[in-house]
Every structure is written in C-alpha cells, then in structure tokens.
C-alpha cells in the first residue's frame, strides 16, 4: 500500500479507543516492524478563544468542545496533507489539554520525524456521517429541547459532517468501529473516566474536572451524532467490534472493502 495507510478508529466515549489503538500500534511495531503514529481527533479541538468566537457568532453550545465544528479543520487537513508528502519533513501535531479545556502551547506538541507507514486516527466521531434533515426536527434530549429550540446548533453540526468532515474522512483507508450497546452504557463509562482523571489531577486546582451532573450534561452534546453512528456505522465500517457491558469485545465483524 502507498504509505501512509490511514486507519480510522471510532467509538463512543469511554469505549476504549485509546487502549485499542495503543494495542494495535504495539502489535504493528513489534511484529510487523511498522512505523505507526497514533493521533486523536481530540487533539485538534479549536482553542477556547476560537470556540468562544464560534459560540458568539453561531450558537452558544459551540463553546463546548466535542461535536463536529469544534475541531480545527485547517490543522487537520494540513496534517493529512503533510504526512503524505513525498519529500517528508518533520511535522508538529497539536496536543489538547482536557484538564484546562485548551490547546497546549506549541513547544508541547507532538513531533513526527519519520514518515509513518500507518496512521491511527481515533475519535468518537471519526467517520461519522450526516443525518437526513428531517431527523433533526425532533429533539433527542433535554439540552436540545431547551437550548437549541431553533435547531441552529444541530443544523450547523450536521452541515459540518455533510461537507468538511466528509472530505476529511474520505481520506481514511479503513474504519474500525467499537460499538457499545447503548448511550446509557457510554454515560456510565464516561463517568468512570472522569473519576480517574479526578484522582490523577488531585493536586492541580486549575483543572476543569467535571462532577456527575456536568458529565451527563456534557454528554448530551454528543448524543445525536453518537446515536446516528450506532445505526449507520456498522453498515460502512471495515471492522465492527461489538462490546458488552464489561468492555469485552463480544464479536468482531470484518468486511472486505
């Protein structure tokens, strides 16, 4: 295959994307001697400053990182373009600090000094497709009902998926999808993650660690795209891993593309 080979790795919050991607990466490096670079779509979130502008010009809910439209598309497109260059020069890749909800300064970014054979691009909405417009009419949760009465936020997110993100995801060579049973299971797993983050960051008072209600509210912004992926991603992903409630891969389905 012409390198680099792009593998998309998707799955709802708390499904274990990072664990699986590090496992795939170790196997490819150790046994297949491949140069693998792992990156998360989360590292491409817009800065707080940029999201603040977006929240004022389009909709206040865009201040919350997560949904398509809150990533820096220019940075992502540049990254995809640069790693494909024939004459490879070292590349800096952004890094996002969730504990302060902002991008790290450039000196803390990742460096790619050698052209990767394989890039694992992971994220909760990697490979997500737009919904039909008519399904946007019905609110999916309390947050949409109360804060997106005019459908501006959901229409904006959907339009992003239909255009910019579609163009970006079309560059993936394959997509691995980690499928959880339902959204309430993802909420449970995400709460577990936040507790771990809390223990890890006990000493730093500046950190934006969320309490239970904040986590559940935060996740409502993810619900629409996540539930659409539950329905649609198994139809177009190359590999579907079905997870049970204990995070164990129950079954895996491989499809020839």
Image: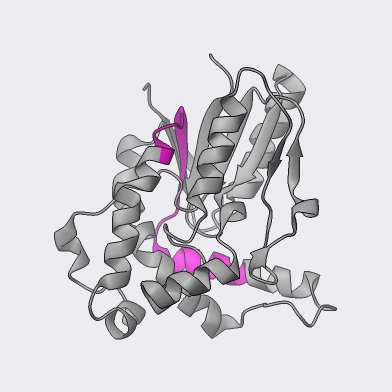
75 relative position to 156: left or right: right
How many labels sit on residues? 0
Decide: is 228 above or below 60: above
Identify the residue at horizontal 46%, vertical 46% (top origin). Answer: 126
The relative height of residue 171 versus residue 128 in the rendered view (above or below) is above
Q: Nearer the viewer, residue 154 or 60?
A: 60
Q: Is residue 127 visible?
A: yes
Closer to us: 30 or 58: 58
Quadrant for the C terminus in the image: top left
User: Which residue is pictured at 37% across the width and 39% down the height?
Assistant: 167
Q: Is residue 64 visible?
A: no
Q: What residue is drawn where x is 51% and y is 47%?
A: 74
Residue 93 in picture, x, y percent from top left: 67, 44
Q: Quadrant of residue 182?
A: bottom left
230 or 210, which lies in front? 210
Range drawn in magenta: 168-192
Tell me where residue 147 appears, x and y as whole percent.
Answer: 33, 83
Query: Seen from this angle, which residue lies furthest left?
Result: 134
Residue 155 colored in magenta in the image = no
Residue at image coords 64%, 71%:
194
Indicate yes or no whether the magenta region holds residue 177. yes
Q: Residue furthest right?
A: 203
Colour approach in the figure: one colour
Query: Where is residue 37 drawn, in percent x and y?
Result: 68, 34
64 relative to 225, above or below = below
Q: Position of residue 141 (x, y in %)?
A: 32, 76
């Amino acid at each position: 295959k012409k390198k680099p080979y792009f593998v998309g790795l998707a799955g709802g919050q708390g499904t274990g994307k990072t664990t699986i991607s590090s496992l795939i990466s170790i196997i490819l490096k150790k046994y297949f001697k491949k140069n693998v670079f792992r990156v998360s779509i989360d590292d491409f979130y817009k800065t707080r400053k940029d999201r603040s502008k977006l929240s004022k010009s389009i909709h206040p809910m865009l201040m919350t990182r997560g949904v398509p439209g809150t990533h820096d598309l220019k940075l992502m497109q540049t990254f995809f373009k640069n790693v494909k260059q024939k004459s490879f020069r070292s590349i800096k890749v952004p890094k996002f600090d969730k504990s302060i909800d902002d991008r790290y300064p450039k000196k803390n970014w990742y460096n790619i000094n050698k052209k990767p054979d394989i890039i694992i691009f992971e994220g909760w909405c990697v490979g997500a497709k737009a919904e039909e417009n008519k399904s946007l009419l019905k609110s999916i949760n309390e947050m949409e009902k109360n804060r997106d009465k005019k459908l501006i936020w959901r229409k904006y997110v959907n339009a992003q998926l239909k255009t910019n993100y579609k163009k970006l995801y079309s560059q993936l060579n394959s997509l691995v999808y980690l499928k959880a049973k339902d959204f309430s299971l993802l909420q449970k797993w995400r709460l577990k993650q936040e507790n771990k983050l809390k223990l890890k960051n006990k000493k730093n008072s500046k950190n934006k660690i969320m309490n239970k209600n904040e986590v559940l509210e935060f996740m409502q912004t993810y619900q629409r795209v996540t539930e659409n992926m539950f329905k649609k991603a198994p139809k177009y992903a190359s590999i579907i891993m079905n997870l049970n409630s204990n995070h164990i891969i129950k079954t895996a389905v491989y499809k020839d593309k």
